[in-house]
Image (tube, rainbow, N blue to C red):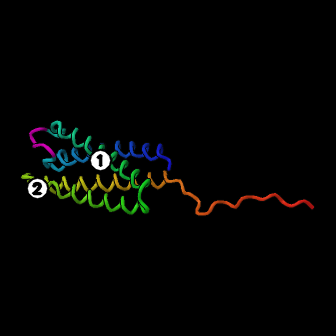
Amino acid sequence: MNAGKLWAGGAATAAVAALIAIAGVLLGRGLFNVDVLAPKGQGVWGDASTGWYALGAALAALAATGLVHVLIITTPRPMRFFGWVMALATVVAMLAPFVTDESLGSRVFTAGLNFVLGVAIGSLVAGTAKTAIVPVPAHPAPRPYPRPYR
């Protein structure tokens, strides 16, 4: 496995995830006038929770990279397990806003944003992992024997 390529892709995914989070918060607050992570009185940029949300998205991408790295090293079908873990983690992230007392619009928008983040992180890290895996030949090449003298 090319770990350098995997972690470079993970870092790039972290940057993309943070930007998705920021763009999503700006979209929700600015265009749809929905409370996303902070009350409307905080303005379009909101409070520090916007930064924390972006940081959390970036850390989630790095955690996904670490998970797929461990799975590649230790499990027989790492990408299948990674897909399941990412799908379930995305479902949990989508359900999390519904345990708050926020408005329904805020909860639905945040769940949708978490869905987009989960899909982006899962697909980008999986794509990077597939390119970082170096295939091992099933059977070694036969040893060349010298030709007999004639």
Gap between marks 2 and 1 measured at Cα: 20 Å
Is the residue under label 1 in contact with that under label 2 (CB below 8 Å)? no
Q: Please name whichever residue, 117 or 5, is drawn nearer the observer in this view of the structure.
A: 5
Q: Residue at label 1? A: 60
- Note whether residue 124 is visible: no
Q: Residue at label 2? A: 99
Res. 105 image quadrant = bottom left
Q: Please name whichever residue, 18 or 63, is drawn nearer the observer in this view of the structure.
A: 63
Q: Please name whichever residue, 112 or 69, is drawn nearer the observer in this view of the structure.
A: 69
Residue 39 lies in the magenta-colored region:
yes
Q: Please name whichever residue, 33 or 141, is drawn nearer the observer in this view of the structure.
A: 141
Residue 90 percent location from the top left of the image: 26, 57
Q: Is residue 47 left or right of residue 130?
A: left
Q: Residue at x 35, y 55 (%)?
A: 122
Q: Determine whether the residue tagged by mark 1 lies in a helix, strand or loop.
A: helix
Q: Amino acid at mark 1?
A: Ala
The earlier-in-sequence mark between 2 and 1 is 1
Residue 33 percent location from the top left of the image: 14, 48
Q: Which range of residues does the magenta coloring cover?
A: 37-42
Q: Residue at x 64, y 60 (%)?
A: 140
- Note whether residue 10 is visible: yes
Judge the density around disc 1: few (<14), some (14-19), many (≥20) Cα neighbours within 10 Å: many
Q: Determine whether the residue tagged by mark 2 lies in a helix, strand or loop.
A: helix
Of all residues shown, which one is farthest toward the top? Answer: 48
Q: Is residue 9 above or below residue 140?
A: above
Image quadrant in which the C terminus is located = bottom right
Q: Residue at x 41, y 59 (%)?
A: 75
Res. 23 image quadrant = top left
Residue 139 percent location from the top left of the image: 61, 63
